[in-house]
Structures are given as C-alpha cells and as structure tokens.
C-alpha cells in the first residue's frame, strides 16, 4: 500500500519532477502507482487533478479536496489494485 496526502503534497511543493513523459497516464494502475516513489506519486496525482479540472473547466484550486481525494484514492486502490488511477480519481471527484 502507498501513502498519500500531506507527505505527497509536501514532496510536490519541494520540487518533485513530473511523471515520465513516455508513460500513458490513462493506463497506470493502482498496483503500478503503489510501486512509485512518493515524489513520483505526488507529481502524478497533481497532474491527474489538473487534468481532471481542465476536462471539467474548473479554474479554482481546492487543496483540501485534492488531499481528501488522494486519501480516498489510496483506500480504493488498496481494494482494487488493477483499477486505472485516472478513471478511479475521476469517479471520486464526480462524487464531490
């Protein structure tokens, strides 16, 4: 299992690099995500949140909602390791 939330956000703020350019982020599974370093998880989840917000034309940033979604995502990924991260994140944000 992987840890998200405050530590992941801290890693992002401290300058974690972006996810590798050659990865198809729509295909990354929860199992794959669990094998990443915390810095890569933070970068990936920040990208996923920005992508989701862009797709839904939201122009505001709600850090608390993002952190909450990251915690729920961690729980969902633990239950469904073969689930796609992007799709799971989107389903969680639709419930906001």
Image (tube, rainbow, N blue to C red):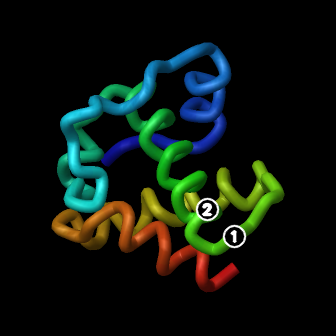
Say if 19 sits above or below 28 in the image: above
Q: What residue do we see at 34% from left, 61% from top?
A: 85
- Residue 75 is labelled as none
Q: Is residue 44 above or below residue 15?
A: below
Q: Measuring from the top left, give residue 54's x and y in whole percent.
A: 61, 62
Q: CA distance from mark 2 to mark 1?
A: 5 Å
Crowding around mark 1 (Cα neighbors within 10 Å: few <14, some 14 to 19, many 20+) is few
Q: Secondary structure at mark 1?
A: loop
Q: In the rendered view, does 87 fall on the left or right side of 14?
A: left
In the image, residue 46 lies at what x, y percent? 55, 43
Give the residue pinned by disc 2: 54
In the rendered image, the quadrant that contains the C terminus is: bottom right
Looking at the image, the residue that sits furthest to the bottom is 95
Say which residue appears at 43% left-offset and 57% top-offset.
74
Q: Considering depth in this image, is 20 or 92 the residue closer to the camera?
A: 20
Residue underneath mark 1: 57
Question: Taking 61 as reference, is 2 left or right?
Answer: left
Q: Is residue 82 above or below residue 23?
A: below
Quadrant hosting residue 52 = bottom right
Are circles 2 and 1 on residues that touch, CB within 8 Å?
yes
Image coordinates of residue 58 in percent, x first then y, are 74, 67
């Amino acid at each position: 299992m992987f840890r998200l939330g405050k530590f992941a956000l801290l890693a992002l703020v401290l300058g974690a690099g972006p996810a590798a350019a050659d990865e198809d982020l729509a295909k990354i599974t929860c199992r794959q995500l669990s094998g990443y370093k915390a810095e890569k998880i933070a970068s990936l989840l920040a990208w996923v949140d920005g992508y989701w917000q862009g797709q839904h034309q939201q122009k505001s940033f709600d850090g608390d909602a993002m952190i909450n979604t990251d915690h729920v995502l961690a729980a969902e990924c633990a239950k469904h390791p073969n689930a796609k991260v992007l799709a799971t994140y989107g389903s969680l944000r639709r419930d906001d």
